[in-house]
Amino acid sequence: MLVDALRRSLMNEIVAAAVVIDAKDDAARAFYEYHNFVSLAGQPLRWFLPMTLIARQFSSVRVDVQNTESLLKCQFICK
């Protein structure tokens, strides 16, 4: 779901500087931290990922129509 949400935010016609999320607990916080989200100062459960970083991640993925979803998942989840 994370990959799909990031892809949709990147392809949206609305200009945005970042994707901002509110982690519901420490486990969610650890998940977003693992995926390179950045914590907002003074708000330990609010995280963001700049659109420039999202665009860079998606542009480095080789597009293969039949394997696009698995390639995107690997780019963000497989480290």
Image: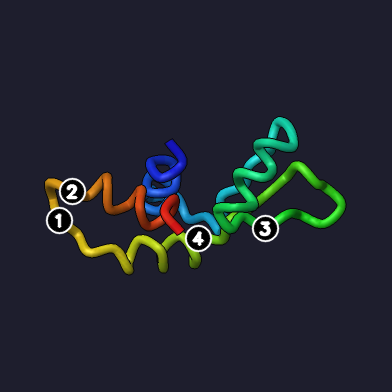
Specify whether 15 is left or right of 58. right
| Residue that label 3 marks | 38
Q: Residue at x 22, y 50 (%)?
A: 68
Q: Which residue is mark 4?
A: 51
Q: Amino acid at mark 2?
A: Asn
Q: Badge 1 is on which residue?
A: 64
Q: Where is residue 73 drawn, in percent x and y?
A: 36, 48
- The residue type indicated by label 4 comes to Met
Q: Residue at x 40, y 63 (%)?
A: 57
Q: Secondary structure at mark 2?
A: loop
* Sequence-earlier tag: 1 or 4: 4
Question: Is 22 in front, or is 11?
Answer: 22
Q: Please state which of residues 58 and 10 is positioned toward the viewer in this rendering.
A: 58
Which sits earlier in the primary sequence, circle 3 or circle 4? 3
Q: Are marks 1 and 4 in contact (CB under 8 Å)?
A: no
Which residue in the protein does label 2 denote? 67
Tell me if mark 3 has few (under 14), some (14-19) or many (20+) residues whose alpha carbon lies within 10 angstroms of its own. Answer: some
Residue shown at 76% from the left, 54% from the top: 40
Question: Quick check: marks 2 and 1 in contact, CB under 8 Å?
Answer: yes
Callout 3: helix, strand or loop? Answer: strand
Q: Looking at the image, which residue is at 87% across and 52% down?
A: 42
Q: Residues within 10 Å of mark 2 (few under 14, many from 20)?
A: few
The reply to whether callout 3 and callout 4 are in contact (CB within 8 Å) is: no
